[in-house]
Amino acid sequence: MRIIICDDYPVIVKNLIRDIKQIVPQAECAGFSKAKEAQEYALKNAADVAILDINMPEISGLTLAQIIQKKNPRVNIIFVTGYPEYALEAHELYASSFLVKPVTAKALKKAFENLRNPVANLTGDVIQNFYEGKIRLGTNIRRLRAERDLSVQEFADAMGVTAQTVYRWENNERLPDIVKLVVISDFFGVDIRTLLR
């Protein structure tokens, strides 16, 4: 799991990284006290989670969240702020969580347990490669479906989704979540890595 942390107070960044490492030991954390640096990093590296202060010089956390979401629509945004009046704006960006400072380890843990877009074995690189068209998931699903002589509707029924969702998967417009990827790989009897080639 790749996590971006940005707060204009370096001590808060340091404390958040410490707490995250207790909650998600395998997490790859990139901490920044300057929003411009976080933005540059986020545009080059797809993150699973972005923990952002809202009131920062240069770029607000709300603007930074929009920039990151444009690059990676499935990123989970967790806002940490001393200004609870920003809650509505954070909600409008579909943030996973809105935490008021001082942030406790317990509150942070709860935020990670309730991510809007759950993160499992899909790395930020896989997601980034998908959105950059480097992963042929749709082509692989279409090929495997055709090999089994299944219509789009038959496959959709087997997956418990609509035919439109299958169409979106097959045309690389939408990435199935990790749970659905496991279901798809089990259905076709292939490894997830085979689907993601």
Image: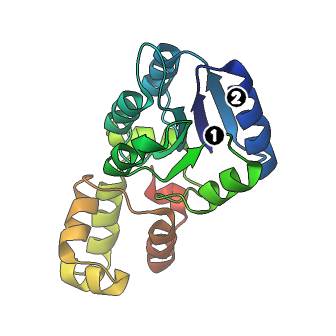
The amino acid type found where label 1 is placed reads Lys
Q: Which is more N-terminal, label 1 or label 2?
A: 2
**Looking at the image, is 153 positioned above or below residue 59?**
below
Give residue 167's position: percent from left, percent from top. 20, 65
Q: Is residue 164 above or below residue 10?
A: below
- Eye-nearest disc, 2 or 1: 1
Q: Which mark is residue 61?
A: none
State whether residue 160 is above or below residue 87.
Answer: below
In the rendered image, residue 152, in percent from the top left (x then y), is placed at 20, 76
Q: In this figure, which residue is indicated by the disc labeled 2?
A: 12
Residue in view at x 40 percent, y 19 percent: 59
How crowded is the residue under tag 1: few (<14 C-alpha within 10 Å), some, or many (20+)? some
Q: According to the image, label 1 marks what residue?
A: 101
| Residue found 53% across the figure and 34% down from its top | 52
Quadrant of image for the N terminus: top right
Secondary structure at numbered mark 1: loop
- Residue closer to the observer: 130 or 97: 97
Picture residue at 47% right of the left edge, 31% below the top? 54
Question: Residue 114 falls in which quadrant of the image?
Answer: bottom right
- Name the residue: 67% across, 33% down: 29
Count of numbered tags: 2
Amino acid type of disc 2? Ile
Dot 2: what SS? helix
Give the camera-side residue of 150 and 72. 72
Q: Quadrant of residue 129?
A: top left
Alpha carbon of mark 2 to alpha carbon of mark 1: how far? 10 Å
Residue 71, above or below 25? above
| Residue 27 horizontal side relative to residue 154, left or right | right
Check whether the beta carbons of the residues at disc 2 and disc 1 lie within 8 A of each other.
yes
Residue 61 image offset from top left, x and y in percent: 44, 30
Packing grade of label 2 (10 A; few <14, some 14-19, many >=20) is many
Give the colour scheme of this rendering: rainbow
